[in-house]
C-alpha cells in the first residue's frame, strides 16, 4: 500500500470521526425552542422532502382530475348535441305531419262541401321541365279515373287528368302553356278563357274591351268547357290593360300555390256540358 493511499484513508477516517462528533453534539445540544438541534435539522430536511413530494402528487392529481373531467364534459357535450339533433329531426317530422294533417282536413272539408263525387289522391311526382307543367297522382283507371277529369284543391282549380294508367295518372296543371279553362269574373259575370303561360301565372283571354273588370276580381270556372265544374276558384285579376283591340289584356294570379301541393281531389262527376255531350252522342 502506498503512502498516498494511507494518507487518504486516514483523512476520510478523521472526517468521519469529526462528523460523528458533530452529530453527537447536535443530539445533545438543544435549540432555543428546547428541541435538539439534530432532531430539528432532520425534521426540517424530511419536511422539505415531504413538501416537494406532496406538491408533485397534488399536481399530478389535479392534472388527472382535470383531464378526466374534461373527457367527461366532452362526452356529455357529444351526447347533448346528439340529443338536440334527434329532437330537431323529430320536431321537423312532427311539423310535417301537422302540415299534412291540416291539408287533409281542408281537403276533407272541400269534399263534404261540394255536391260532386270525388276521390282523394296524393301527388307522387311532378314534371321536370317548366314548359310542361304536370304532376303525377297515385290514383288511376282502377279507381275510376279517365281522361279530362278535373283535379281541384281546397284553394281552387289544379288541372285535368291527361294520361291515366291502372294505378297512377298524369295531371296537366292549369298553368301549363297548353292548358285552358272556361272562366268568368265572379262580380261582373264577364266571360272569357283562362290559359296558362308556363310560369306560375295565368292569362284571361277573349274578355270584351267594354267588360267590367278590375284588379282583385275573383275569376272562377264557367263550366262551359265540359271539364271543370262551374264556380271553382281559378285566381284573382292582378293586372288589366287596354290593348286597343276588341279584347282586354288580363293577368290572373292563380288561387292555388302549385309548388306546395301534396293532396288533391279528382272530380268523378261529369259536368253538365260533358253530360249533355254524352247524351247527344247517344
Image: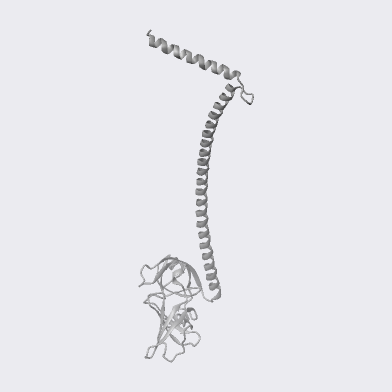
Residue 65 picture location, percent across and down: 53, 39
Q: Picture quarter containing residue 182?
A: bottom left
Q: Quadrant of the N terminus?
A: top left
Q: Picture quarter containing residue 175?
A: bottom left
From where the camera sits, is residue 226 visible? Answer: no
Instruction: Decide if residue 40 is on the left or right side of residue 184.
Output: right
Q: Picture quarter containing residue 112?
A: bottom right
Task: Specify the farthest residue to the front.
Answer: 32
Task: Specify the farthest residue to the right.
Answer: 34
**By what rule are the colours in the image chosen?**
one colour
Which one is in front, 266 or 94?
94
Residue 190 picture location, percent across and down: 46, 88
Residue 277 picture location, percent across and down: 43, 82
Image position of 62 with respect to 125: above or below: above
Image position of 182 with respect to 138: above or below: below
Residue found at x 51% / y 49%: 77
Q: How many marks?
A: 0
From where the camera sits, is residue 73 visible? Answer: yes
Residue found at x 50% / y 46%: 74
Residue 233 picture location, percent across and down: 49, 78
Residue found at x 51% / y 34%: 56
Amino acid at each position: 500500500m502506498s503512502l498516498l493511499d494511507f494518507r487518504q484513508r486516514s483523512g476520510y477516517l478523521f472526517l468521519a470521526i469529526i462528523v460523528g462528533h458533530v452529530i453527537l453534539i447536535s443530539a445533545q445540544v438543544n435549540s432555543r425552542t428546547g428541541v435538539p438541534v439534530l432532531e430539528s435539522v432532520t425534521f426540517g430536511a424530511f419536511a422539505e422532502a415531504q413538501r416537494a413530494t406532496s406538491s408533485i402528487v397534488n399536481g399530478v392529481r389535479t392534472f388527472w382530475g382535470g383531464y378526466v373531467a374534461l373527457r367527461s364534459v366532452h362526452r356529455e357535450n357529444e351526447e347533448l348535441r346528439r340529443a338536440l339533433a334527434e329532437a330537431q329531426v323529430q320536431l321537423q317530422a312532427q311539423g310535417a305531419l301537422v302540415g299534412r294533417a291540416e291539408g287533409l282536413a281542408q281537403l276533407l272539408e272541400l269534399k263534404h262541401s261540394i255536391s260532386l263525387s270525388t276521390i282523394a289522391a296524393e301527388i307522387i311526382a311532378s314534371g321536370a321541365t317548366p314548359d310542361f307543367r304536370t304532376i303525377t297522382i297515385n290514383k288511376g283507371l282502377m279507381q275510376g279515373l279517365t281522361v279530362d277529369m278535373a283535379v281541384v284543391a281546397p284553394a281552387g282549380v289544379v288541372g285535368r287528368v291527361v294520361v291515366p294508367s291502372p294505378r297512377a295518372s298524369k295531371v296537366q296543371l292549369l298553368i301549363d302553356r297548353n292548358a285552358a279553362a272556361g272562366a268568368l269574373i265572379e262580380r261582373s259575370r264577364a266571360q272569357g278563357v283562362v290559359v296558362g303561360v308556363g310560369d306560375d301565372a295565368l292569362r284571361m283571354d277573349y274578355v270584351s274591351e267594354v267588360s267590367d273588370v278590375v284588379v282583385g276580381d275573383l275569376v272562377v270556372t264557367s263550366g262551359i268547357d265540359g271539364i271543370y265544374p262551374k264556380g271553382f276558384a281559378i285566381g284573382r285579376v292582378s293586372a288589366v290593360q287596354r290593348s286597343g283591340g276588341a279584347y282586354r289584356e288580363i293577368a290572373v294570379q292563380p288561387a292555388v300555390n302549385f309548388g306546395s301541393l301534396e293532396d288533391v281531389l279528382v272530380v268523378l262527376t261529369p259536368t253538365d256540358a260533358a253530360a249533355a255531350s254524352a247524351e247527344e252522342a247517344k
